Amino acid sequence: MIDKRIPRVLGLLGQEDTLRVLSGLVLHPGEPLGQVTGLGPDEVARALGRLERGGLAVRDGDGWRARPEVFRDLLRAVPAEPAGPLDAFLVDGRLVSIPTKRAKRLMLLDYVSQVFEVGARYPEKEVDVALRAFHDDHAALRRHLVDEGFLTREDGVYWRSGGTV
């Protein structure tokens, strides 16, 4: 089982605005983030919110600071054993393809669904962030998860409804 924080962190780093803000926090601590990133105040605020929820940034007095120690923690959490039957579809934790055979696709979807907490509700954007860490076509992956009953969707909100616990 993978640490649920890994896909979330990778998904955050896959978004240009969030990556720029994190880079600004690391490379230019204490400087105005809008100035060092070239982003507007609303974009900076949204990116900081996502980074805070993902554990990569924290409020520090009147400003913000990056939490690079999260990367070391996540590295320690990476399982040493390969994924086994999913090896043909995963390279460095990312999907190279979505299996066409349903039995293998179900195993893969079960593996991916583990990043979502049972009982937690997620807006579509957060689901996409987590799934982007696995595959560039996060919309197709999300659709497969819903179609196969691993996630349920209602009014743009998703929750885990299947898979192993």
Image (cartoon, grey):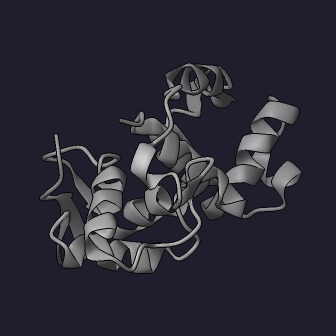
State the image quarter where residue 38 is shown.
Answer: bottom right
Identified at 27% across, 55% down, the residue is 110
In the image, residue 14 above or below residue 93: below
Residue 85, image x and y in percent?
41, 51
Q: Nearer the viewer, residue 67 or 100?
A: 100
Can the viewer see residue 52 in this picture? yes
- Nearest the eye: 121 or 44: 121
Q: Can residue 49 be seen in this snapshot? A: no
Provide residue 157's location: percent of width, then percent of height.
23, 68
Q: Is 78 above or below relative to 45?
A: above
Q: Nearer the viewer, residue 45 or 17?
A: 17
In the image: residue 154, left or right of residue 47: left
Count of numbered marks: 0
Quarter of the image with the C terminus is: top left
State which quadrant residue 34 falls in.
Answer: bottom right
Q: Position of residue 7 (x, y in %)?
A: 49, 47
Q: Is residue 160 above or below residue 128?
A: above
Q: Is residue 6 above or below residue 163?
A: above
The quarter of the image holding the N terminus is top left
Residue at the location (12% across, 59% down)? 161
Q: Quadrant of residue 56?
A: top right
Percent x, y for residue 124?
35, 69
Residue drawn at the location 53% of the way across and 25% of the way down:
80
